[in-house]
Image (spheres, grey):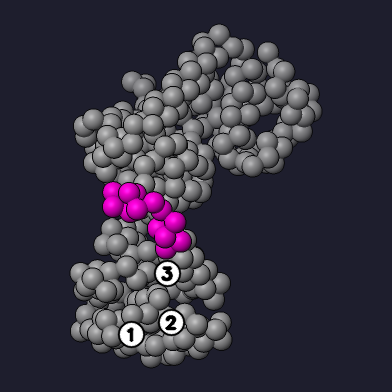
């Protein structure tokens, strides 16, 4: 039976959470503040620590610091449980080394899922280490060979970020501090021209990497990145990313191939914007958004007319006329921001 340490100064919440976990077949020990909790953790070495942030004596941040500096407790999974829901608070907790961050009020499923995933990760890492050749154990981190390996590294070691719809991840002119992997949601990168018109340069979907202005130095971003829907990201600092590329040549080559593919897509997009008909630009843009936002192209997409027009490289009024034409032909159905593809094959054949 796995042991969970709950560090929480609210007596009712502490007891209720303990009862919930005991019913779920966990052995539970509790502490009323961080100072007591840190001492208990050193003595009993629980499998997971669930800790509040705002507490007397020693807060959650201080508790994590104490446990991280102790050789016996530094590898114990640590989950923050807090009413502090601001992005800066979440980022601070994750930057300090927490494994997860659950905001109050939380559901039973949220807590159990977080604990089980931490326990599973520890188990997998232990098995992986046990099966490694002695040479790899001495060398430490295993070589990354593919883009998939790189994305797994992001998931395991990156800092978690959450952004609500229409929130900027970074702005044009901001310094490039992180490379991001999208775990959930869609991102648009865009620039503003001299007339104040927005031009969407790239769309990124779940499982895409983005945010790289330069891999060799801390340059500023040349475009703004905005969440089209609520997004969950993991980020690795540009310094750490450079270290990965220097020590993992195979993944560096794969990344070059990925960037080359991105350039070909961008060239195709520019040619379509320059020479394609209005209806073709509109159709191609709808397909592009459907691919990025939906798991199935036929599912409705919810997107603003201005975003569609920006990606298509046409005026919003022109786009609206093109949408009306596609509706009359029975190819799409449009209702406000909602657009549904009725005839996928016809949409692809528009010229």
Could you tell me residue 95's position as x and y percent? Answer: 28, 58
Viewer-proximal residue among 193 and 104: 104
**Separation of residues labelled 3 and 2 (CA atoms):** 22 Å
Residue corresponding to mark 1: 44
Can residue 271 be seen here? The reply is yes
Do the CB atoms of the residues marked 1 and 3 lie less than 8 Å apart? no
Can residue 313 be seen here? The reply is no
Residue 87 magenta: no
Looking at the image, which residue is at 64% across and 17% down?
A: 280
Do the CB atoms of the residues marked 1 and 2 lie less than 8 Å apart? yes
Residue corresponding to mark 3: 103
Could you tell me residue 51's position as x and y percent? Answer: 35, 76
Q: Which mark is residue 3?
A: 2
Could you tell me residue 123's position as x and y percent? Answer: 46, 65
Q: Which one is earlier in the sequence, the residue at label 1 or at label 3? A: 1
Looking at the image, which residue is at 44% across and 56% down?
A: 131
Q: Give the quadrant of residue 293.
A: top right
Q: Is residue 161 above or below residue 333?
A: below
Do the CB atoms of the residues marked 3 and 2 lie less than 8 Å apart? no
Question: Which span is picked out in magenta?
Answer: 125-140
Q: How would you rate the neighbour count of disc 1 (Cα within 10 Å): few for under 14, some for 14-19, many for 20 or more?
A: few
Assign a secondary structure to mark 1.
Answer: helix
Could you tell me residue 98's position as x and y percent? Answer: 33, 65
């Amino acid at each position: 039976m796995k042991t969970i340490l709950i560090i929480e100064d609210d007596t009712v919440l502490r007891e209720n959470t303990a009862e919930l976990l005991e019913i779920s077949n966990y052995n539970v020990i509790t502490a009323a503040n961080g100072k007591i909790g840190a001492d208990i953790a050193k003595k009993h070495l629980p499998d997971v620590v669930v800790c509040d942030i705002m507490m007397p004596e020693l807060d959650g941040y201080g508790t994590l610091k104490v446990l991280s500096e102790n050789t016996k407790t530094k590898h114990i999974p640590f989950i923050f449980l807090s009413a502090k829901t601001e992005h800066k608070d979440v980022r601070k907790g994750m930057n300090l080394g927490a494994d997860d961050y659950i905001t109050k009020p939380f559901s039973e499923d949220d807590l159990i899922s977080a604990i089980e995933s931490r326990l599973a990760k520890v188990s997998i890492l232990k098995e992986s280490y046990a099966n490694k050749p002695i040479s790899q154990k001495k060398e430490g981190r295993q070589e990354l060979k593919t883009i998939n390996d790189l994305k797994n590294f992001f998931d395991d070691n990156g800092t978690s970020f959450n952004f609500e719809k229409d929130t900027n991840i970074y702005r044009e002119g901001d310094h490039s501090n992180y490379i991001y992997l999208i775990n959930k949601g869609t991102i648009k990168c865009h620039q503003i021209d001299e007339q104040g018109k927005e031009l969407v340069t790239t769309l990124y979907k779940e499982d895409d990497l983005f945010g790289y202005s330069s891999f060799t130095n801390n340059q500023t971003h040349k475009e703004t990145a905005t969440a089209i829907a609520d997004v969950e990201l993991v980020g690795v600092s540009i310094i750490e990313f450079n270290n990965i590329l220097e020590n993992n040549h195979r993944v560096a080559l794969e990344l070059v191939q990925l960037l080359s593919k991105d350039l070909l897509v961008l060239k195709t997009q520019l040619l379509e914007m320059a020479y394609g008909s209005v209806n073709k630009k509109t159709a191609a843009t709808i397909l592009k958004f459907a691919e990025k936002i939906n798991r199935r192209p036929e599912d409705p997409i919810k997107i603003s007319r201005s975003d569609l027009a920006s990606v298509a490289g046409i005026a919003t009024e022109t786009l609206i006329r093109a949408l009306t034409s596609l509706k009359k032909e029975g190819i799409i159905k449009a209702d406000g921001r909602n657009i549904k593809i009725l005839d996928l094959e016809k949409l692809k054949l528009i010229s």
